[in-house]
Image: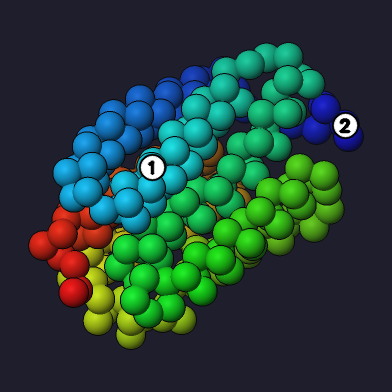
């Protein structure tokens, strides 16, 4: 592993990169508390556990990303970069969890849950031990895994309020659209712009879970 193979950002760009995800980390921790309280009021273990998994994945991701853009030591920075990229798989799987185990549990939810988490674990292992091999395929894997939910679109539309589906897909579009800025490093502050798209995607998914997955009034049965 070459710990020096890191992207060089200007001081101003790195400040923007760091600031955006520090704010996101703080907001995600606050959102964690709010969602867990709401889920606890339902008394449903599926809602409570899946909400905790979802928010934990977001909070951990944003904290690690903030550290990656903060530390200066090349070797330490390299480690956090690997964790940052591997964490994307965990965010995707964590986001799927409440939709799979609450909204789609009576349909294909468990199948989706096992598949997504299996793929995510494999992705984390791949990112951790084969960092530079086929790295160009990583965005393809992220997009494919993130949009796999369309396979069960009929079930989603049947078991979730349409507004919840709207926020879910809006989040997916933000995540996907942000990859354009992530990939084109000629754009000034491209990584910070990517961060903003990611935060917007996370917010959309959070609102979908908070408003349309966790509340018992939205249960299909």
Residue 145, horizontal then vertical, whole percent: 55, 65
Do the residues bearing badges 1 and 2 touch, measured as CB atoms within 8 Å?
no
Name the residue at 71% across, 61% down.
137
Residue 52: mark in rendering: 1
Query: At 38% across and 51% down in the image, what residue appears?
Result: 50
Q: Which residue is mark 2?
A: 2
Is residue 56 rendered to the left or right of residue 39? right
Q: Position of residue 61 (x, y in %)?
A: 51, 37
Q: Quadrant of residue 216?
A: bottom left
**Which label belongs to residue 43?**
none
Q: Locate residue 12 relative to residue 208 in the image: left or right.
A: right
Residue 64: quadrant of the picture: top right
Tell which of 43 and 127 is nearer to you: 43
Mark 1, secondary structure of its residue: helix
Q: Decide: is 210 above or below 99.
A: above
Q: Position of residue 7 (x, y in %)?
A: 70, 33
**Nearer to the camera, 221 or 89:** 221
Q: Position of residue 109 (x, y in %)?
A: 42, 72
* In this view, 102 is above or below 77: below
Dot in front, 1 or 2: 1
């Amino acid at each position: 592993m070459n710990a020096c193979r890191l992207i060089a950002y200007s001081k101003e760009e790195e400040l923007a990169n760091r600031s955006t995800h520090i704010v996101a980390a703080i907001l995600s921790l606050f959102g964690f508390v709010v969602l867990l309280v709401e889920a606890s009021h339902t008394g449903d273990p599926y809602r409570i556990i899946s909400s905790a998994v979802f928010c934990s994945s977001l909070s951990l991701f944003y904290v690690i990303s903030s550290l990656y853009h903060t530390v200066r030591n090349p070797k330490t920075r390299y480690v956090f970069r690997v964790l940052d990229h591997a964490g994307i798989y965990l965010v995707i799987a964590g986001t799927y969890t409440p939709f799979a185990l609450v909204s789609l549990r009576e349909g294909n939810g468990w199948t989706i849950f096992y598949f997504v988490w299996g793929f995510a674990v494999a992705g984390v292992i791949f990112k951790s031990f084969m960092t530079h091999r086929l790295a160009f395929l990583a965005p393809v894997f992220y997009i494919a895994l993130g949009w796999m939910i369309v396979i069960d679109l009929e079930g989603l539309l049947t078991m979730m309020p349409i507004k919840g589906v709207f926020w879910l897909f809006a989040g997916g579009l933000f995540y996907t659209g942000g990859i354009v800025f992530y990939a084109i490093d000629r754009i000034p502050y491209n990584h910070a712009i990517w961060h903003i798209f990611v935060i917007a995607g996370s917010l959309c998914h959070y609102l979908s879970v908070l408003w349309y997955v966790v509340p018992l009034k939205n249960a299909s049965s």
